[in-house]
Amino acid sequence: MWSISDKGEREFTGGKEDWAAVAHIAENCPGFKPDDEDEMVADEAVSCYNCRYRRWTIKSFVCCK
Amino acid sequence: MKILVSIDDTDTMKMDGVEVRGTGELSGMIKQAIEDQRWGRCEPITRHQLLIHPDIPYTSHNSSMCFEADIEHVFLKPLIDFASDFLARESTPDSDPGLCVAVTDRISRPGRLIAFGYMAKNYVLTKLAAYNLAETLGIHLSEHGGTGQGVIGALAGAGLRLSGNDGRFKGKLKIKAENNMIKAGDICSRVKVDMVKCLEEGIVLQDDDMVILGDHIKPVWLYGKSVLLVQAIDQGVASPACWQTCSKSQLKDF
Ligand code: SF4
């Protein structure tokens, strides 16, 4: 589910459209914090895709928490 | 006169629990200040997605925010001074904020500004290119901390807003309607929406077409208009409405 980059960053391997997986991760993550409304893209309120600590990458996102 | 005010790269990742204002919020505060000081009237803010690339030092999403304002000539300099000071003061210390203020009908070659905006969605651009273009076109472009890298996104945001065909509006619209159902024409008369249109096909809804409102009512900037995108409802569902507003995930690419 996660790969570790050369820089030691944790990148989600499911890409940008694995809505169910990232909702599940975020629901179980103590670090989840909602991003600004304008930056949210997932319909599920609690989702890594809507989290303040996700940083988009070309293929997916890294978790910066 | 009409101006475009665009900012970029004012925030940082908030790792220490400290609340920091995002670019959208700062843009909203500049807009509010313009109205509070009676310098002019402002249009809603649009958010423009730029390229995500390892060579670009963005925070988490690399987007810029832009709005149009109609002001008197005499307020142009005070506005630029205010926005510059505001960004230097309010942006987070390790951000790289940039400010662009373009007087729309003084831009000598608007096509070049629009092209720069689209280039910033697809290529890694340099600060030098941004400054050179701004100077050529007679546009104010300034940096207010850090590396000043945000000037690229700020200029690009103005170009994309000027294109009339990029981005989604900041914030959500609130529309009261019985059973969350409303005519397309009533949407346009009650809130800042110029057109209700089908997401996938070129169908523009007629005034009497019924729409079911979801909880995410956010127009996009298309054809130089505020356009609310809707999708067809499965005809198997018994409802007087044939359309419903698009969800967040459906609008993510705008
Ligand atoms: S992005 Fe990171 S901090 Fe946020 S919910 Fe996902 S795993 Fe947790």
Image (tube, coloured by chain):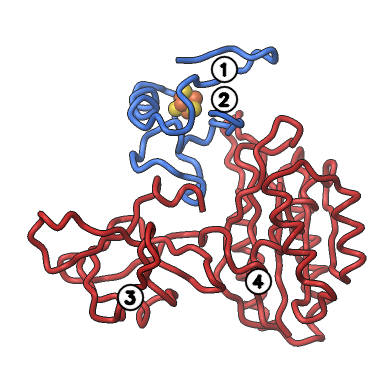
**Labels 4 and 1 positioned on one and the same chain:** no
Chain B hue? Answer: red
Quadrant that contains the N terminus of chain B: bottom right
Distance from the alpha carbon under mark 1 to that under mark 3: 43 Å
Say the numbered circle drawn on residue B33. 4
Q: Quadrant of residue A48?
A: top left
* Drawn side of residue B169 relative to residue B102, left or right: left
Does residue B76 appear to the left or right of B191 in the view shown? right
| Residue B41 pos. (x, y %) | 62, 81
Query: Is the Cβ of the residue at disc 2 closer than 8 Å to that at disc 1?
Result: yes
Chain assignment, label 1: A
Label 3 vs label 4: CA separation? 28 Å
Mark 2 → mark 3, Cα distance in angstroms: 39 Å
Measured in 3D between alpha carbons, the distance from the residue under mark 4 to the one under mark 1, in whole angstroms, is 40 Å
Are the residues at dot 2 and dot 3 in contact (C-beta closer than 8 Å)?
A: no
How busy is the neighbourhood of tag 3: few (under 14 within 10 Å), some, or many (20 plus)? many
Labels 1 and 3 within one chain: no
Q: Residue at x 36, y 24 (%)?
A: A21
Decide which of B6, B212 is in the foreground and name it.
B212
| Residue B75 percent coordinates (x, y) | 78, 81
Q: SS class of the residue under badge 1?
A: strand
Q: What secondary structure is marked by label 4?
A: helix
Are the two marked residues, 3 and 4, in contact with CB atoms closer than 8 angstroms? no
Look at chain A in the picture and name its colour.
Answer: blue
